[in-house]
Image (spheres, grey):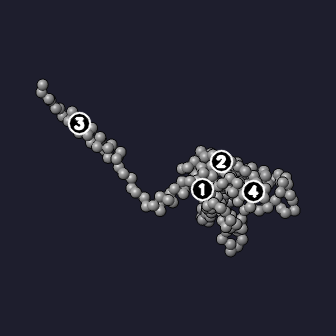
Amino acid sequence: MALHVGTLGSVIAVVFVVLLALVFRWMFRVPRQLPYEVAQIRRTVNQLRTVVVPVVAAMSSERAVELACRLAEPQQAQILLVHVVEVPLSLPLDAAMPKQREAGEVSIAVGVTICETHELASEGVIVPARSAWEGILRVARERHADLIVLGLDAKSRRPGEELSRNVAQVVRRASCEVLVDRPAAATIEQVQPAS
């Protein structure tokens, strides 16, 4: 029996061998080794499970939710949207403050919508407290938050201050990581509609 090799058969055989070689090369490729320090840092960022984001009716708050979602997406972490109702010292902590609660519900609804666009689980919480930073830290502690993302609003700062009082207290006292988003003035001007 004579073996007859045709041109088409030779071409198919060569293509098959080349494709097989490429598949083996891809399968047995050893990934680049990361330095120990880099691997450690990547592991700590990959451990995000719960991210707390304080929300108010401000663009800086909405940006903080968006930033938190982008950080939480790879791990499918839960976003906890917190609105703190600041109760004056002259009232008891359980005082009914319907306007403030309603504003909180609106802010949380906007945050939930942002989380839904990223297909992330979110939960809204309205917390009464004497100051915003106390309420934020209490929720972060009770829910074992891995990260707090704060939006820095230029209007809430006094002239000459880098951080508002609430942001400074959260940064100083938090037992977890804190990320503060301060957008550039040009970014804010681009988003705001012209009058």
Per the rendering, the mark at residue 84 is 4
Per the rendering, the mark at residue 13 is 3
- 84 left or right, relative to 40: right
Residue 185 appears at what percent x and percent y? 62, 65
Sooner in the amino-acid sequence: mark 1 or mark 4 = 1
Name the foreground residue: 188 vs 32. 32
CA distance separating discs 2 and 3: 55 Å
Mark 1, other Cα within 10 Å: few <14 / some 14–19 / many ≥20: some
**Amino acid type for the residue under numbered disc 4:** Val
CA distance separating discs 1 and 4: 20 Å
Sooner in the amino-acid sequence: mark 2 or mark 3 = 3
Residue 26 appears at what percent x and percent y? 35, 46
Residue 139 appears at what percent x and percent y? 71, 55
**Is residue 189 at all visible to an observer of this figure?**
no
**Amino acid type for the residue under numbered disc 1:** Leu
Mark 2, other Cα within 10 Å: few <14 / some 14–19 / many ≥20: many
CA distance separating discs 3 and 4: 70 Å
- 79 left or right, relative to 35: right
CA distance separating discs 1 and 3: 52 Å
**Amino acid type for the residue under numbered disc 3:** Ala
| Residue 179 position by quadrant | bottom right
Q: Which residue is mark 2?
A: 122
